[in-house]
Image (spheres, rainbow, N blue to C red):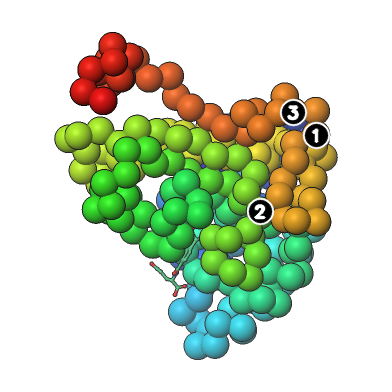
Amino acid sequence: MEAIVRAAIDGAKIAAVISNRADAAGLAFAQAHGIPVAVVAHRDYPERADFDRALSATIDAFQPDLVVLAGFMRVLGVDFVRHYHGRLLNIHPSLLPAFAGLHTHRRALEAGVKIHGATVHFVTPDLDCGPIVIQAAVPVLADDDEDRLAARVLAEEHRIYPQAVEWFVDERLIVTDSGRVEVRGGRGAAFALHLPVLDTGLNTELDSGQER
Ligand code: NHR
């Protein structure tokens, strides 16, 4: 959220920052930047559907064109998601469709994958399954633990999420009938893939043809 605010995207105004937790650090950040804030505490609503309705009423009072989930950890119901169809984004800390759900970095380490990352997607009722807007890949290094891997992914999240929001604001995102996202005016598929430059010497064995 802070990265999106700091990106100061041309033609966009942050209408509000809303959290389900009164102690969320993002609220203080927003206030310090003169952005309206609101809290809708999920604990006040025993029924998920009631929380969803209170949340959408609070959101809609600010009349946003786009709703951006950032570190938002409550599963949203079908009615909520339908209400924001085509204008609700999330960032998930894995290369979807791998590792949907929680604890993605731990699960990536357990699986032994050599590449991991983050995905910005439109939110659909099925968790972490919506149309993919942009992905960033990072290497998983031999001595990684959950925190180191999470930090490497987070740095990329801070790059790709503002980019995705900027594309939306510039009306460049098209979701096709088959549920894929095209970036208008993009230079092919690689346009929406961020690969941090690898200068780690990791590939020398491959490059020199050894140990194949
Ligand atoms: N809601 C829908 N309908 N679809 C998605 O794709 C959603 C969503 C709500 C949140 C973010 C997602 C993530 O990127 C997100 C995507 C929390 C959970 C979860 O299980 C799952 C996915 C995501 C966020 N939440 C628990 C729950 O009972 C609570 C976990 C907790 O509080 O720590 O809601 O990771």
Assign a secondary structure to mark 3. loop
**Residue 163 appearing in the image:** no
Query: Residue 92: horizontal and vertical position, in percent?
Result: 49, 51
Query: Residue 45: horizontal and vertical position, in percent?
Result: 53, 84
Crowding at mark 1 (Cα within 10 Å: few <14, some 14-19, many 20+) = few
Say which residue appears at 26% left-offset and 25% top-offset: 212
Is the CB of the residue bearing disc 3 within 8 angstroms of ligand 1?
no
Looking at the image, the residue that sits furthest to the front is 212
Please, is residue 126 above or below residue 169 in the view?
Answer: below
Mark 3 to mark 1 CA distance (whole Å):
5 Å
Q: Is residue 123 left or right of residue 62?
A: left
Examine the image and state in which quarter residue 78 appears.
Answer: bottom right
Q: Amino acid at mark 1?
A: Arg
Please, is residue 196 above or below residue 94 in the view?
Answer: above
**N-terminal of the two: label 2 or label 1?**
2
Query: Residue 124: horizontal and vertical position, in percent?
Result: 65, 65
| Residue located beneath label 2 in the image | 131
**Residue 60 appearing in the image:** yes
Looking at the image, the residue that sits furthest to the left is 143
Q: Give the camera-side residue of 118 and 30.
A: 118
Tell me the number on the disc at residue 184: 1
Mark 2 to mark 3 CA distance (whole Å):
17 Å
| Residue located beneath label 3 in the image | 186
Q: Is residue 197 left or right of residue 141?
A: right
State which quarter of the image contains the N terminus: top right
Pointer 3 with pointer 1, Cβ within 8 A: yes
Q: Amino acid at mark 3?
A: Gly
Q: Is residue 49 left or right of residue 22?
A: right
Examine the image and state in which quarter residue 173 appears.
Answer: top right
Crowding at mark 2 (Cα within 10 Å: few <14, some 14-19, many 20+) = many
Please, is residue 178 above or below residue 155 in the view?
Answer: below
